[in-house]
Image (spheres, rainbow, N blue to C red):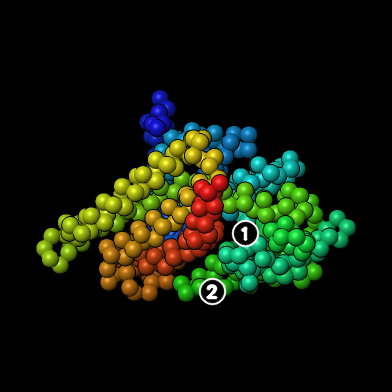
Amino acid sequence: MDIAPDADLEKFREEVAEFLDTAPTPEIREAGRKTTSIFAPFEQVMAWQRILHARGWAAPAWPVEHGGPGWSVEQRYVFADEYQKRGLPPLLPNGLQMVGPLLMELGTPEQQARYLPGILSGEDYWTQGYSEPGSGSDLASLSCSAVPDGDDYLLNGSKIWTSHAHLANRMFMLVRTSREGRKQQGITFLLLDRMDYPGMEVRPIIGLDGVPEQCEVFFTDVRVPQSGRVGAENDGWSVAKQLLTHERGGSAQSPMLRHRLGAAREVAARTPSGFGGTLADDPVFRRDLGELEVEVASYEHVEKLALSGHEIARDPAFPSLNKVISSELTQRISVLMIRVAGLDALPDQREALHVGAPVDPLGDDLALVAMPYYLNSRATTIYAGTNEVQRDLIARTLRR
């Protein structure tokens, strides 16, 4: 299937290119060069979201009625393509790509009016409270409890691997409201208006890269309003599965993958191979690069079909399929980046990765980010449900 471009698509591309060439500050551009995971440097990326919001471009996939631009699929791809050409930092996904779209589908009109504007503007930043110390891949075994008390719930328990919880002012989470029946049947989806409720404690976890991206969150008799519940009590598993369809495939990933491949190709073209010529001339490298380029191009076509409303996106297996393909392509591209950077990727440059760092990086931009990107990408086949779980879901769907 070919998706016909809009008649004014090139004019739109020129408009996007002019804005992206002039609007980002030097600090925002630096944050883009130093992004090594799905989470870009927080201060700069939130400043960038506010700039995009002022233009009406913070959420390319959102409909007009909720503040989005109402772009076609091709316009969204043009925007993503020009965005990635400039290496700009990706906007943080928890609000714009996850809980925001969920609220459009399942939230009450009051919840939509209360939360969507702050998500779009960047005034609010949401963290995701799912995993627990004993409930990771087996998320349905979670035990953080919410006991009804009048119009409130009393929360007790903990969450872990809660990304950017120390920077967030809101949380969406899964809680245990019943222990009867199957474990999936006693879970409720809850929105928290604050991260500083009495009895609530956030403890950052310092990663190997020295960055406190993940956190633990503890709840001791934390009182929160039941009005934050999305969907019915004890039906949170259904709500969470709906949210995961956005987390596993709610945005265009292929332009970012093409950008990473392009950066590796450019550096390989000027890197001596050791056997005469450059790395880009090496037949084994050319084969591996070519295979990845073909797979990314194929994945891009599938993404466009899905985002355009093609029936493939309505297949229950598609979110899992999309997650498996994109995460494994990410990992394979990260390996190629390491091959290109070679020994230059080995020095520990954590200080140089900070925006505004007073030290110059060793080597080029690829050498600076290749190893952190490789290490961070190991998690892509784990978060949002491990790829082993996704393949099981695909197999179960296909057997029906």
Counting other residues with Cα less than 10 Å from the Cα at mark 1, is it few (<14), some (14-19), or many (20 or more)?
many
Front residue of this view, candidates 164 and 86: 164
Q: Mark 1 or mark 2, which has the lower sequence index? A: 1
Q: Say whether marks 1 and 2 touch (CB < 8 Å).
A: no
Q: Which residue in the protein does label 1 denote? A: 127
Query: Which residue is drawn at the image coordinates 42% and 71% (left, top)?
Result: 350
Residue 138 visible in the current orientation: yes
Q: State whether residue 104 is above or below residue 129.
A: above
Q: Is residue 125 shown left or right of residue 334?
A: right
Could you say which quadrant of the image residue 301 lies in?
top left
- Quarter of the rendering occupied by the N terminus: top left
For mark 2, give the secondary structure. Answer: loop
Q: How many marks?
A: 2
Q: Residue at x 38, y 34 (%)?
A: 14
Drawn side of residue 104 relative to residue 27, left or right:
right
Q: Residue at x 59, y 34 (%)?
A: 64
Residue lying furthest right in this view? Answer: 150
User: Which residue type does callout 1 highlight?
Assistant: Thr
Q: Amino acid at mark 2?
A: Ile
Q: Position of residue 131 (x, y in %)?
A: 62, 65
Which numbered tag is attached to residue 206? 2
| Visible residue check, residue 201 | no
Residue 62 image position (x, y, % from top left): 57, 39
Q: In the image shown, does 246 or 212 lie closer to the viewer?
A: 246
